[in-house]
Amino acid sequence: MRGKLLAAFLAGLFSFCLASTSANAQQPLIAAEAWQAYKSKFLDPGGRIIDDANGNISHSEGQGYGLLLSVLANSPADFELIWSFTRTELLLRSDGLAAWKWNPATKPHVTDINNATDGDILIAYALGLAGEQWNRPDYIKNGAGIARAILDKTVIQISGRSLLLPAAAGFSAKDRDDGPVINPSYWVFEAFPVLDQLAPSPVWAKLRTDGIAILDELRFGPKQLPSDWVSLKSPPGPATGFPAEFGYNALRIPLYLVRGGVADRALLTRLMRGTSGANGEYTTIDAVSGTVKDNLADPGYRIINHILACVVDKTVVPDDLKQFVPTHYYPSTLHLLGLSFIAAQQPECS
Amino acid sequence: MKSTFIALSAAVVAIGIVGMNKPDYIKNAMQSLSLSDAEEPVARSSRLAQQSDIGIAGANAPVFREIKRSARPVLDSVVTAATAATVDESALRYFASRGDTARLQAEISRLKALYPDWVPPKDPLAVPQNEDKQLEAMWDLYAQARYPEVRKAIAERLVSEPAWKPPADLIDRLTVAEARTRLINASDLKQYETVVRIGSETPSLLTCSEVDVLWRVAEAFFRTDKAQRATDAYSYILNNCQNAAERLATIQKAAAILPAKSVEDLLAKEKAAPDGTMEFDSIRDDLARRFVAEANADGKLVVPPQYLSRVERLAEAGGLASDALLLGWYYLPRGDMEAAEKWFRKARDKEDTASASQGLALTLIDRNDQLAAEDTMYRWRDDSKEAKAVYLAATANLLALEPPVPISGDVLKRVATEVIKSRDPSTAQQFGWYARALNQPQTALQWFRTALNWKLDDEPSAYGLAVTYLQLDDLKGLTEIQRLWAGRSERIARVGEVEEPETATRQQRLANETVLVQQQPRTTRVPQDVEDVQPEQVAVIRPRRTVAVDRGCKSTINPQTLAPEAALTRGWCLMERNRPMEAAAAFEVGMLGSSAKTREDAAYGQSLAYLRAGLSGKAAVSAVKAPQNRQRAFELQQAILADKAVAAFDGGRSREALLILDQLKQIAPERTDLLSLRGYAYLRLKRYADARRVFEALAAIGNRDGQRGLGILYQIFNDKD
């Protein structure tokens, strides 16, 4: 019974994603001006999304975001551009996953053939959406291939739970003393129903429920927050070799949750309280001491907790955050994802 | 549009034959196109006129096809020429609009070859541009290999102009170009399965105009354990593609990964140039070197003889040390020591390197010229771990030689220094035996102890200590070492049992019996005093017993009154009468002989005489008083050992006899008489099982000693019963 309900819910969510974008073909979820401003700053004419805070490299995550934003901005031409680059420059691995990093300064540009599972998820997800939206069987086919590779190479079952490893290699219990190590911010909840359409498997729904359950359990330090990188060797804790912090990875978790339709009030409230700065900033937090590490004033970060407040308390998002002015690749991407979420699902908050 | 496309395809098929016999200037034109821009996709065609499946089986295997060049971009606005409805001048117009005269000229040549009736425009630069500016812009991006931007432009136009259909040719070319980029990227990143997959999905890439792609696919096959398919791909190129430089590069690339046999098959596809030279001549030398080098690493590899002799010719004529070295290392593991030594010497004469010296030293060790081996390796001993190992092998062998060779003080010192520095137990142990052979038991003790310090479980060194303690009547030392080795070495436990004490007493007796006539001047002793090179700074000087007797064979004659040849004869006579000390004196005179043969015989005789007298140290000294030829030295070594063994047995020292027999067995197959000696030695030691094994083996070949031995054993066991 519960399974059926969930399936219905997921199918509904999926069709919502598509319907909301298709139906609004004339009025995309990302405004043309905002998309134009984003592109002019972060999209290279050759089709790569530039991470301007990281030496202007590109990565599979950025390409995935670029593809997703193209769909949300209803721009098939930009999607084509970014996809062509992604396919020829990153989708090279023999296992069908994408190389994670592309550096303009090196030759060959890919210096590390490893994948990053969130990048793969975002790319496959965007391909699934675009294939449906613009009736492109080739997108569906490519997306399905990546989705199958994600299942084959990065999903593991541990004590009855389905886990996403951050990459095909290097994070399992075999690879690390404190393994398996996960990155909770790689659970792009909104993608799982689409990936299930592309490569049908009960694992996708399990990833969702298990992902939420894990987030519910990961409460490190006084602020009760997960860390960017988590060792699931019992008891769970911040993984060794990474800063023990709710940092730049984890800060997108709440956004992924609400975009994915997770309405767990307690979880959302805990995350919101733990990361709200004194002056309305979004904060990164030391996962052990609970102290604030960085106060983030960028609107792309700040909008996250306002969206949570909107979902939980129906408060209105401040006007200054509704204006999109590109700053840096990462917060600006989150900003557009946040704005598109409000446009699609919480018009009352705007 | 579509009908134009089909018509053109038909035309291309029709002119396939023309394409196969392209005049040279066409080839040159095509080449200049590809040379002018490595990424030049505009000049390439995806159209297939002839398929040549080379039998690469499997549904997913790329199929290699021969390609015939066709007119390129089939645009909507094709201007039909009067004579040929399908002449496509769009590329012409494109290059004209770019002012790219080189490519323009090449395109004109190409079109003229394809359409003999076609008349090129008088002023090509004045040719009107393609009318569809947006499409022109797409081709422009395509020509610059900016494929994602072409995709974007197409998608943009489809949005703004939903009725527009992108030209199929553009889409085809774009798809192929993207696949090509992807394939090359994947190949650079060693994602070989991706390379194979893209190759199989994009057969139009697998043509002579994309030799680089073919090479990469071939390598990907090889790296994904499909060596035969890799060979097929290289074969395809050599069967179908004409570019000389690419053909040569193909062989080089194939040779870099494929086994010699496959490369040999590919080389058979070599073509002769008009002047008679063969196209792969220039790389056969390198190939031959490679094959030999590979065979060096794998002793089981067989190098086709023509390659071996090619490298030999190169080494003889060209005189590269590296070539000679290759050959040395080829012959060495195959046991052809003579050839190996020859080439190592040649290499070393050209340039003394660690490798050449190492190789040479190994051959010298093999033919038992340890002194030369040590000398060869000394300079290179610290070059590498292997060099050090070879050097120490030489030193250990040098000291183990029977009889000992003369070693200069300098050499002994440097060997000792190096052995101590390297803490090499083997050579240290041999220093011990060497000291014993020169009757310097105190020094022997030092070395055996040192060897044991470095290698706690070095049983031979412990045994050396035990027998040396016994020799020195150091029963405390002997008991201690026997205690330490109790349960670990039977022969150490038995040192000093029954027959062993004889060793000491016997020598004492002999010394008492002989008349000391004169003290041999120290300077005449050939082997440098090993006492100088003790492992520790404890010099134990023992006066050396030196003996010389002058008795006749029947009567007593001072041999010094005899001519050397006569003294030699007298020496052998005395040996037959078992009067070894007198024989030794006679041989001493024989060594003054004028002929080398006499001196050699005398030295040999004296060494046997001393051996007979139980003076192994003296025997060793004698043996080196005259140079022995290689064969003789070997025989002498055997003879000395055999004699030692017999003497030990006769002296009641069965255990020592067995030790010597073991030594002997290491340098030559055991003779039947010595085997029966071994049997009797076992018998005496009550090692009945061992004795039975030996006697049975002898009896099996009809040997009487064997039968007799078995008889004795039978009696022993029956008596017991």
Image (cartoon, helix red, strand yellow):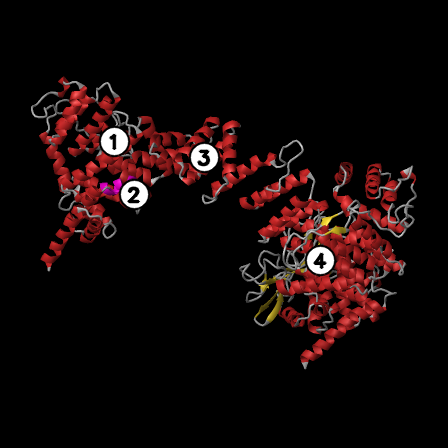
Give the quarter of the image for residue B365. top left
Q: CA distance from mark 2 to mark 1?
A: 19 Å
Compared to residue B414, the image places residue B19 above or below, namely below
Q: Chain of mark 3?
A: B
**Decide: marks 3, 2 in contact (CB < 8 A)?**
no
Q: Which mark is residue B539?
A: 1
User: Which residue is tagged 2?
Assistant: B452
* Relative side of B629 to B322, left or right: left
- Highlighted magenta segment, given as a residue range: B660-670
Give the labeled residue for mark 4: A61
Quick one: B190 or B531, which is closer to the camera? B190
Secondary structure beneath dot 4 equals helix
Tell me whether marks 4 and 1 sit on the same chain. Answer: no
In this view, the mark in front (1 or 3): 3
Which quarter shows the N terminus of chain B? bottom right
User: Residue A206 got which mark?
Assistant: none
